[in-house]
Amino acid sequence: MAKIYTRCGDNGTTSLIGGERVDKYDSRVEAYGTVDELGAHVAMLTDLAVEAGHTDTATYLDGVAVRLLTIEAQLAVGVGFKGQLKQIAEEDVKGLEAEIDRLTEGLPQLRCFTIPGGARLISQCDICRTVCRRAERAALRVTADHSVDEQLLCYLNRLSDYFYTLGRACAQRLGVEEKAWNV
């Protein structure tokens, strides 16, 4: 096995898929790094779902993790390699919307903002939601200088809604009362 370190990044640059070298503060690196961070939080959320006996949620989150890696790859593509990797499809976004709708069916109507917390599983949903929003903002910054597939942006936007809805659904499943925040 090759060594994990290459020393190629010691000068503050890294390679995109296809070999293009860019600064480590390039908007694409920032964006895929934030999605990578989200993936780590999703892994923790999956583990907490398993601990709580929510295997259906854990299974769904496994699919989310795969799509996040697809998004990372799309954001990490350099010049000359565009269009050669798997893309987030409209069906991925629609599938996420269907899951949000399914979770929403059993929830009381939302009449105000809610304050996160009540159990580690619920709090982790909110951490995923906030990191996802940051990943979306980072991906949007990439669009200023590089093309980004529209479905990727739509998926990140819906995914943060999914994490919020999942947190509410987990609260209900765990018997944790939602704390209302009123303006």
Image: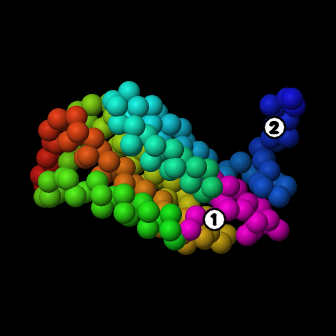
| Residue 97: quarter of image | bottom left
| Residue 47: quarter of image | top left
Q: Estimate how packed mark 2 is, as few (under 14), some (14 to 19) or many (20 or more) residues with alpha carbons within 10 Å.
A: few
Viewer-side label of 2, 1: 1
Kindly identify the amino acid type of the residue bearing the numbered disc 2.
Answer: Asp
Locate residue 162 relative to residue 3 in the image: left or right.
Answer: left
Kindly identify the amino acid type of the residue bearing the numbered disc 1.
Answer: Gln
Q: CA distance from mark 2 to mark 1?
A: 31 Å
Cβ–Cβ under 8 Å for marks 2 and 1: no
Residue at the image position 39 percent from the left and 37 percent from the top: 55
Q: How many marks?
A: 2
Residue at the image position 30 percent from the left and 58 percent from the top: 102
Residue 8 in the image: above or below residue 69:
above
Visible residue check, residue 48: no
Per the rendering, the mark at residue 87 is 1
The answer to which of 59 and 76 lies nearer the viewer is 59
Per the rendering, the mark at residue 75 is none
Task: Indicate yes or no whether the magenta region holds residue 11.
Answer: no
Residue beneath label 2, please?
A: 10
Visible residue check, residue 88: yes
Q: Which residues are magenta?
A: 72-89
Residue at the image position 59 percent from the left and 45 percent from the top: 36
Image spot of residue 141 (x, y percent): 56, 64
Task: Indicate yes or no whether the magenta region holds residue 88.
Answer: yes
**In the rendered image, which quarter contains the C terminus?**
bottom left
